[in-house]
Image: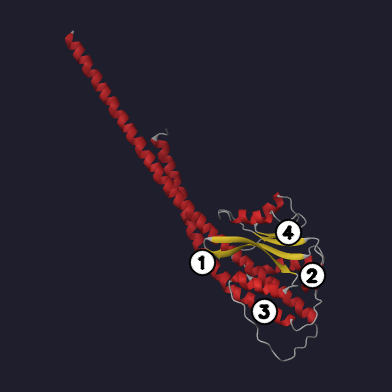
Amino acid sequence: MPNTRDIRNRIKGVKSTRQITRAMQMVATSKMKKAQDAAKTGRPYALILADIIVSIADEFEEITQSYFVQKPIKHRGILVIGTDKGLCGALNGNLFRKLSDVENSAKFISVGKRATQFLSRTKRDLLADFSLPDKPTFSDIRKIVDFLLRSYDDGSIDTIEILYTSFVNTLSQEPELIRLMPLNDLDSMTQKLHERFGEPEHVAPKDSREILFEDKDAVLSELAALYLKQEIFQLILESQASEHSARMVAMKTATDNAGNLIDDLTLQYNRARQAAITQEILEISAASFSNLNFSLFKSLL
């Protein structure tokens, strides 16, 4: 059984750890609220942009632009959105478990140190890795989108897919793999987008006026690039909201567990202290009894 000094030192160490986890919980709570607001604010724009693409594409009888045409798939291109830091529960573990189900013919682009480390450790085909600030802006996504479109145009990848952690609520985050390109099934794309964001579908009003496009492929190309940039930006915001939510819950659990451990250690400390006091009393009593017996024996002599 450990002595009281060891237990007291351990209680002190656990209390220090609890202070750290409580501070991290408070920081994650503050960041979580801002990330959730940013993610929810960007959803209407993503939906409107998708509806605009569908309404414009309906004006053409045939679309030949490469971003809207399905081609044979030799290598899937998957953008994996992970985190830079740990201590966020099973968030990254669930994401990488879903990534492990992808066949080896896929090529990957990573965002976040944890995703890069996992892809490198499992020896997967990593084309590029990117890092983003804590508060990414729309312009920060440009380099990622430019690389994806360049790889798609030169045939390095035949699809553009995103593996990220979808934000459901504060206690629930789910890994999800979605395909953004090619945009060959626009109706299904918009339907899934509305379902993912929990927004009802609405029919865009028809305009009877005739629209003349001098270069429809150029218009569709710019719209597709803008849609890809907005979607990736939105999914990164969703991933950050999931990360901060998961970290807040993990740190709260760690703080609560530290408190329970301190209570158990305090009880163990009190028991050890009481046992030591009892042992000392017994030793003093035994010594007094021995002295008394010796005095009586001496008096008899």
> Who comes first in sequence, dot 3 or dot 4?
3
Badge 3 local density, few (<14 within 10 Å), some, or many (20+)?
Answer: many
> Who comes first in sequence, dot 1 or dot 4?
1
Check disc 1 and report the residue beneath it.
33
Q: Secondary structure at mark 3?
A: helix
Q: Secondary structure at mark 2?
A: loop
Res 70 label: 2
Badge 4 local density, few (<14 within 10 Å), some, or many (20+)?
Answer: many
Q: CA distance from mark 3 to mark 4?
A: 29 Å
Mark 2 in CB contact with mark 4 (< 8 angstroms): no
The quarter of the picture where the N terminus appears is: top left
Check disc 3 and report the residue beneath it.
51
Residue occupying image coordinates x 72% and y 77% = 223
User: What's the amino acid at mark 2?
Assistant: Gln
Residue occupying image coordinates x 38% and y 39% = 268
Relative vertical location of residue 6 with respect to residue 32 in this rendering, above or below: above
Mark 2 in CB contact with mark 1 (< 8 angstroms): no
Query: Which of labels 2 and 4 is toward the front?
Result: 2
> Who comes first in sequence, dot 2 or dot 1?
1
Check disc 4 and report the residue beneath it.
108
